[in-house]
């Protein structure tokens, strides 16, 4: 945590508080185990990221897969956040939370036909394309539904991050993204679409 950001979890007289609420009191009221979030910590963190990139006017998207709690998503929606989703279920949750479709980016290699159609009908902001087959499917469904689809390409740079093999995503043999040659070959299809 940056030195200038206040923690909203703290101790008073040996008792843990979340903001000004004793955590023990919450546990007694709802039982344990429990998840307890600080509204102010969430807002402060989001605003800090917004401020850090403010000169670039970015779309800052919350990764719904990190925590699809509707209340958290609603809070971030009211702050102006977008959503990074990986499935039709996450799209549904993001929309239910009030995240506008024009701020939703659909990422991940597992998009199926029904999910792509759903996202097109909702007029989401963008698809992160992971493969040639996915690009062709998005292009075909866009034509069938008479919708346009913005896309970005997820490039797999074939760089070894020297981490555990189960969490590596940037090597050629990983399932995520396109290598540079594949991306270049897709350019004519992207340009004509």
Image: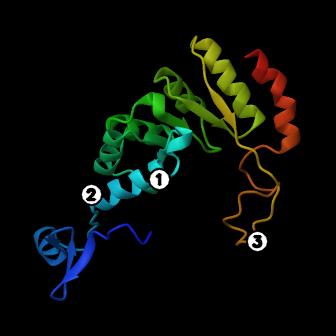
Where residue 51 appears, as percent x and y from the top left, is 45, 50
Residue 39's tag is 2
Residue at image position (42%, 72%) is: 3
Instruction: Give x and y (percent) for residue 8.
Output: 27, 69
Q: Secondary structure at mark 3?
A: loop
| Quadrant occupied by the N terminus | bottom left
The residue carrying mark 3 is: 162
Q: Quadrant of residue 14?
A: bottom left
Give the image quarter of residue 44. Answer: bottom left
Q: Which residue is mark 1?
A: 49
Image point (37%, 34%), residue name: 95
Q: Secondary structure at mark 2?
A: helix
Residue at figure coordinates x 58%, y 10% from the top left? 146
Mark 3 and mark 1 residues within 8 Å of each other at the beta carbon: no
Q: Nearer the viewer, residue 81 or 34?
A: 81
Mark 3 or 1, which is nearer the eye? Answer: 1
């Amino acid at each position: 945590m940056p030195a200038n950001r206040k923690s909203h979890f703290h101790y008073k007289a040996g008792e843990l508080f979340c903001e000004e609420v004793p955590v023990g009191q919450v546990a007694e009221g709802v039982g344990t185990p429990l998840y307890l979030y600080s509204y102010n910590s969430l807002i402060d963190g989001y605003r800090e990221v917004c401020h850090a990139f403010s000169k670039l006017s970015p779309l800052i998207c919350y990764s719904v897969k990190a925590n699809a709690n509707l209340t958290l998503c609603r809070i971030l929606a009211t702050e102006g956040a977008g959503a990074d989703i990986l499935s039709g279920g996450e799209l549904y949750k993001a929309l239910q939370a009030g995240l506008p479709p024009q701020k939703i980016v659909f990422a991940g290699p597992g998009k199926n036909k029904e999910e792509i159609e759903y996202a097109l009908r909702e007029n989401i902001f963008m698809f992160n394309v992971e493969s040639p087959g996915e690009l062709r499917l998005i292009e075909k469904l866009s034509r069938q539904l008479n919708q346009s689809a913005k896309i970005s390409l997820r490039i797999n740079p074939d760089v070894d991050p020297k981490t555990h093999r189960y969490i590596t995503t940037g090597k050629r043999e990983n399932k995520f993204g396109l290598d540079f040659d594949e991306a270049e070959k897709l350019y004519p299809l992207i340009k004509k679409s």
